[in-house]
Amino acid sequence: MSKVTIVLLIILAILLIAMVVLYFVGKRLQARQEEQTAQIEASKQRIDLLVIDKKRMKLKESGLPQQVIDGTPWYARRGKVPVVRVKAGPQVLNMVCDDAIFDAIPVKQKIRAEVSGIYIVSARGSKGQKLTVPDDGKKKGFWRRTLEKVQEKAGAKPVK
């Protein structure tokens, strides 16, 4: 066998081992996430909140309790988290929000939210209406427009 064939076989073996390791690690992480989702679903409550402010902040600057900061993994501490400052009854709290609904939460308005601890799972308007993401009127960039055109032609996005 030539040297090129041997090198290619070694690279193929390394890639195969890496794929197997990633498969099992991904399976374990998926099981852990399903467990956490089940815990959140079991302990969530519906609460009326007055949203004071919302920002994406680093975990250290968010004003969350020290126990929450200590409980987060080291790799997640550097990223920014969506933090919502709310008034629940007489208390003013900082809460972490789900990324999917962060943009839809209105500032200085009442919402009815499903909360699990200090985590806002979902939110609706004060009278039960759905919250929609406001269009901030920003100009779309070249890549965003191109991506939307391609998705529209492929049928992945409804035609406007």
Image (cartoon, rainbow, N blue to C red):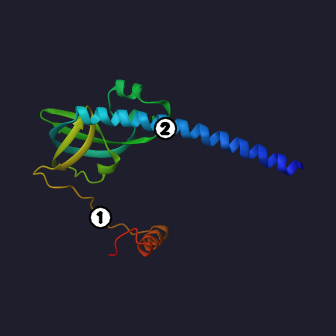
Of residue 7 and residue 103, the one placed in the foreground of this image is: 7
What amino acid type should be assigned to the residue bearing mark 1? Asp
In the displayed structure, 49 sits above or below 152; it is above
Callout 2 secondary element: helix
Looking at the rendered image, the disc whose residue lies closer to the viewer, 2 or 1, is: 2
Q: Earlier in the sequence, mark 2 or mark 1?
A: 2
Q: Nearer the viewer, residue 35 or 60?
A: 35
Number of marks in the image?
A: 2
Question: Which x, y percent locates residue 37?
Answer: 33, 37
Q: Residue at x 72, y 42 (%)?
A: 13
- Tell me the kind of residue under disc 2: Lys
Tell me if mark 2 has few (under 14), some (14-19) or many (20+) residues whose alpha carbon lies within 10 angstroms of its own. few
- Residue 58, located in which quarter of the rendered image? top left
**Residue 73: x %, y % from top left:** 46, 30
Residue at the front extreme, as displayed: 1
Q: Is residue 79 left or right of residue 108?
A: right
Q: Quadrant of the C terminus?
A: bottom left
What residue sits right under mark 2 in the picture?
27
Residue 7, compared with residue 142, is above or below; it is above
The residue under label 1 is: 135
Q: Residue furthest right?
A: 2
Q: Residue at x 22, y 35 (%)?
A: 44
